[in-house]
Amino acid sequence: MANESPVDFSATIGSLTDALSNIGQVQVELLDNGIKSATSTLESWSPVVVSAVENLTGTLNQVLQGISASMAPKQ
């Protein structure tokens, strides 16, 4: 037992702290990249979605007008 080398706790704690900070930094970067890509995707799809909603609204309006016209009493 006399031949065992002493454990350097400060170096071990320093290495552990570095590893944890690197893991934290990678997670922050992944989250940041995910948010940026989601925002980019939403920005590119927004004109398409707005156009589709406008078309759907116009179509529903025409359907409701047709139903109203067919239910209205004939004069």
Image (spheres, rainbow, N blue to C red):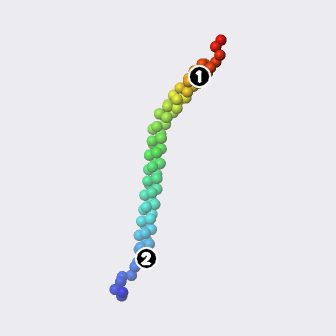
Residue found at x 43% / y 71%: 14
Horizontally, residue 35 falls left or right of residue 69, namely: left
Q: Is residue 31 above or below residue 16?
A: above
Give the crowd class for mark 1: few <14, some 14-19, many >=20 residues within 10 Å: few
Residue type at numbered disc 2: Phe
Residue found at x 44% / y 53%: 30
* Quadrant into which the C terminus falls: top right
Residues 71 and 3: in front is 71
Badges 1 and 2: C-beta atoms under 8 Å apart?
no
Quarter residue 73 falls in: top right
Residues 6 and 55: in front is 55
Residue found at x 51% / y 28%: 55
Q: Mark 1 falls on what kind of element? A: helix
Give the crowd class for mark 2: few <14, some 14-19, many >=20 residues within 10 Å: few
Residue type at numbered disc 1: Ile
Q: Which residue is mark 1?
A: 67
The disc, 1 or 2, on the residue closer to the chain's N-terminal end is 2
- Residue most extreme to the top: 75
Horizontally, residue 23 falls left or right of residue 61, namely: left
Q: Is residue 6 above or below residue 63?
A: below
Residues 1 and 15: in front is 1
Circle number at residue 9 = 2
Using the numbered discs, state the Cα–Cα distance from disc 1 to disc 2 in whole angstroms: 81 Å
Quarter residue 71 falls in: top right
Q: Residue 25: x percent and y percent?
A: 44, 59
- Residue most extreme to the left: 3
Residue found at x 43% / y 58%: 26
Q: Is residue 68 above or below residue 29?
A: above
Q: Is residue 42 above or below residue 65?
A: below
